[in-house]
Amino acid sequence: MKINLKIQRFDPQTDQEPHFQTYEVEVEPTDRLLDAMMHIKRFEDGSLSFRKSCAHGVCGSDAMRINGKDRLACKTLVRDVVAGEGDTVVIEPLRYFPVQKDLIVDQEEFFTRYRSVKPFLINDEPVEKGERIQSPEQRKAFDDPTNCILCAACFSACPIPEENPAFLGPAAIVNAYRFLADSRDRGFEERLPVLDVPDGVWPCQNHFKCTEACPRSIKITKRINQSKRMITKYRKERGESVKDAKL
């Protein structure tokens, strides 16, 4: 069947504003949207620009907004976004990021926020018997955040940056939680200056848009709330005030 891909285009070297360009493509309902885009790139318009790599939902490169929802093009089938012949799929770049060209966005700030939470194990204690032992239950506590592929779909889906562009964002927080919940980690206090601030964990309002957008089924909203509870418990145990989103 034939469908239309209405793709947002923008070349900063030649364009004043973004605009849409529509391509008609022949597809099967079981084709991936990425396949249709690659057909356009290879045979119709080589200037069309977007990121892609593994094409199997592992690298996170091809995150974009598809019919208003943040998805991976490689995990989105044609039948997921069209009802039949002649339908149109609207494709836009992720929100809140500077557009470098077409669907390619500058993610430097996204990764700066990610790095700010120190997403690595912090523990200078001597290791006994060659490794730090964990029980299955301890490992399970942070299992799903380890699946994050840093695609930034959750950040684009989140409504909070519309009013608070400085919000740390769901991806950074969920990667912080991955270590906050790790029984081997000792970096809780080192991460507090980034997490326990007005633009840290507290702006989250439980819209669940991040959780809905996550291609790896991470319980992002739940993990953000658990991070808030950890911080609240830590402050109360020390008789300190707990910051909240109103600050």
Image (cartoon, grey):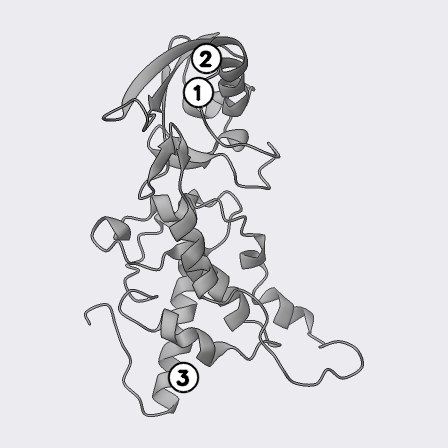
Specify the quadrant that holds the C terminus.
Answer: bottom left
Instruction: State the image coordinates of residue 201 (x, y, percent, origin top left).
Output: 34, 66
Residue labelled with disc 1: 48
* Frontmost residue, 29 versus 169: 169
Task: For mark 2, give the secondary structure.
Answer: loop
Residue under the point 30% across and 72% down: 197
Residue 80 seen in the current view: yes
Asked if marks 3 and 1 touch (Cβ < 8 Å), the reply is no
Three-letter code for the amino acid on which mark 2 is drawn: Asp
Instruction: State the image coordinates of residue 72 (x, y, percent, origin top left).
Output: 49, 35
Residue labelled with disc 3: 234
Vertical position of residue 130 compared to residue 102: above or below: below
Q: CA distance from mark 2 to mark 1?
A: 6 Å
Number of the front mark, 3 or 1:
1
The tag on residue 45 is 2
Asked if marks 2 and 1 touch (Cβ < 8 Å), the reply is yes
Q: CA distance from mark 2 to mark 3?
A: 56 Å
Residue 29 seen in the current view: no
Callout 2 crowding tier (Cα within 10 Å): few <14, some 14–19, many ≥20: few
Task: For mark 1, give the secondary structure.
Answer: loop
Residue under the point 43% across and 69% down: 226
Instruction: State the image coordinates of residue 241 (x, y, percent, origin top left).
Output: 27, 85
Residue 235 vs residue 33: left or right? left
Instruction: State the image coordinates of residue 223 (x, y, percent, origin top left).
Output: 45, 63
Q: CA distance from mark 3 to mark 1?
A: 50 Å
Vertical position of residue 173 compared to residue 92: above or below: below
Number of the front mark, 2 or 3:
2
